[in-house]
Structures are given as C-alpha cells and as structure tokens.
Amino acid sequence: MKRPKTFKIIAILLALSTAAALVDGCRQNKGKYNMNPAEKSQTGAELRLQKATFAAGCFWGIEAAFSKINGVKSTTVGYTGGHLQNPTYEQVCSGKTGHAEAVQITYDPKIVSYEELLDLLWKIHDPTTPDRQTQEVGYQYRSAVFYHSEDQRLAAEKSKQKAQSRFTKPVVAEITPAPPFYKAEEYHQKYLEKKGQKSCTQP
C-alpha cells in the first residue's frame, strides 16, 4: 500500500529538522569537547589571574616585598612608561628613555585584592618624593601606578587619597594607563633572593 504524498513530505521535513538540530548542537559543544591543549591551559584558575604594575624606586626591593604576599603568583621586574622599545638597564639608568623601574605582578584576586596590593605599595616606599627614593635619584625611580583597567584606575585614585592621610607632604605618585612592559635582564629577576639580601641597601 502506497503512502500518500503528504506523509512523505512530513517525513522529509522531520528528517531535515533533526539533522539541523544535530548540527547546531555540535557547533555549541565544539568549544567544550574539541579544545586544543593551549585553550585548555587557559581555563579555570588561570582565567582568574590579573596583573598589577607598580613603580616605587629600585625594583629589586619592590619585587621582594610583593613576592611574599599570599595570592601573588609571580613577579617580574622590568621597564615601563618610556619611549624606547626593549631598553637595557644602562639605557634606563641614563634617564633618557623615560622608563621607570617597575614590577609587574600576577595575582589571584580571590586571594588578594588589588586594593590590598595598593595598600602595601604606599607602605613600602615614600610616594611624596618626586623622582627619588632615598639615595636613588632620577626619573626612573618615580612613584607610579600603571593601571590595566578602569576598575584599577578608580581603585588607585581612591587608594591614593586614602594614603594621603599618612603623609604630611602631597602624594605625587602618577596614576596612568599601563604602557608596554619590557622584562629586565635575567640577573635583575629575584635579585635580592639570589644575593641573599633583605633590602637594596644591605651591603
């Protein structure tokens, strides 16, 4: 017995609808099940990590202070805020490149907040001395917060105002968008730890 053409048309439409649903489902799940190793490595905890970049005089001591904080995953010393690409330590020390010695911090905001990092920054250096920290004099030793987002900018402005109450002189620390950051030479990384020193001034 032959089926009416109407039944055949309905069967074809149902088959096409089922096929379309399967294709759509594959597309939606493609990112879940067909991720390459590089994509997988950036999921979970790593996606929560954020960056903070500060300048506050000699970067050896600043790095040492922040590397001890719970929630800070890594620290890198380098140069930022200047006009020369990939500057050397000698070029930065000349004061002609416009860079600041800085520390870039990778941290987990679920463990330590950006505000807590800022609070430590004001405590470990004097943000009221323009282009100077103790015997270190020069534009490369300026005090600065290089923010990576609008939220960081707002937090830095608020924290700076709060820090002002600790000082009798005006806090002159710059708050500026984070420009390119150039990693310093390897011998500068974890310098005090390598030398077994607790501070930059220790002989």
Image (tube, rainbow, N blue to C red):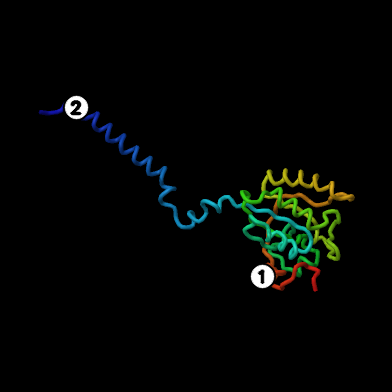
Query: Badge 1: how crowded within 10 Å, few (<14), some, or many (20+)?
Result: few
In this rendered view, identify the residue nearer to me: 91 or 43: 43
Q: Nearer the viewer, mark 2 or mark 1?
A: 1
Tag 1 residue: 186
At which x and y percent is residue 143? 79, 56
SS at badge 1: helix
Quadrant location of residue 91? bottom right
SS at badge 2: helix
- In the displayed structure image, the side of residue 114 where residue 97 appears, left or right: right
- In the displayed structure image, the side of residue 54 where residue 137 appears, left or right: right
Q: Give the quarter of the figure containing the C terminus.
A: bottom right
At which x and y percent is residue 183? 67, 64
Query: Badge 2: how crowded within 10 Å, few (<14), some, or many (20+)?
Result: few
Identify the residue at horizontal 25%, vertical 29% (top origin).
Answer: 10
Q: Is residue 171 above or below residue 20?
A: below
Quadrant location of residue 158? top right
Mark 1: amino acid? Glu
In this rendered view, identify the residue nearer to me: 18 or 56: 56
Q: Is residue 194 above or below residue 111?
A: below
Identify the residue at horizontal 43%, vertical 48% (top origin).
Answer: 32
Identify the residue at horizontal 61%, vertical 48% (top origin).
Answer: 110
In this rendered view, identify the residue nearer to me: 41 or 18: 41
Tag 2 residue: 5
Mark 2 → mark 1, Cα distance in angstroms: 78 Å
Q: Is residue 154 above or below residue 88?
A: above
At which x and y percent is residue 123? 79, 55
Mark 2: amino acid? Lys
